[in-house]
Image: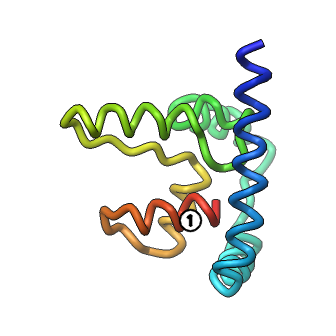
Amino acid sequence: MRKAAYQLLAHGIGVLSALLARLLLPTEVKNLQRRIHGLTLLSPLDVNLTQALIAGEDHRFLFHRGVDPIGIARAIIRTLGGRLEGASTLEQQLVRTLLRDYRISFRRKAREALIA
């Protein structure tokens, strides 16, 4: 039951952020889509590598659409407690890498979440 509720929440956040990104950042989204489509895809032999990456970096990867509400809540709580922590999903890490924007700021993180 909790898993289904999480999936519904994460899916809703993902759909909402995708719509907002297309409205607020249309040029960035289109440029990133072009760059992503130009990337070399992994061969089928690299399935184990892909699964290991997902398991190590974003174990809820299959349940959200680029934004992980549980990760965000955890990061906020720990940051308020004095320990700076991120909540980037693999999608957000890809966006950050493609944009080459590594500043530590709420604005960058929000933009990443929208585009992811």
The image quadrant that residue 47 belongs to is: top right
Measured along the vertical axis of the image, is residue 88 above or below residue 108? above
Asked whether, in this view, residue 82 is left or right of residue 41, the answer is left
Asked whether, in this view, residue 61 is left or right of residue 81, the answer is right
Task: Please identify the residue farthest to the left as the structure is shown.
Answer: 82
- Residue 63, percent across and down? 73, 33
The residue shown at (70%, 68%) is: 20
Q: Which residue does the numbered mark 1 point to in the structure image? A: 95
* Colour scheme in use: rainbow
Amino acid type shown at disc 1: Val
The image quadrant that residue 74 belongs to is: top left
Which quarter of the figure is the C terminus placed in?
A: bottom right
Measured along the vertical axis of the image, is residue 11 above or below residue 30? above
Measured along the vertical axis of the image, is residue 2 above or below residue 44? above
Task: Please identify the residue farthest to the top as the structure is shown.
Answer: 1
Measured along the vertical axis of the image, is residue 39 above or below residue 113? below
The residue shown at (54%, 72%) is: 98
The residue closer to the viewer here, 34 or 84, is 84
- Residue 75, percent across and down? 39, 37
- Residue 13, percent across and down? 70, 48
The residue shown at (32%, 68%) is: 103
Pointer 1 local density, CA inside 10 Å: few below 14, some 14–19, many at least 20: many
Asked whether, in this view, residue 84 is left or right of residue 110, the answer is left
User: Mark 1 falls on what kind of element?
Assistant: helix
Tell how many labels.
1
- Residue 11, percent across and down? 77, 42
The residue shown at (57%, 48%) is: 90
The image quadrant that residue 100 belongs to is: bottom left
The residue closer to the viewer here, 96 or 9, is 9
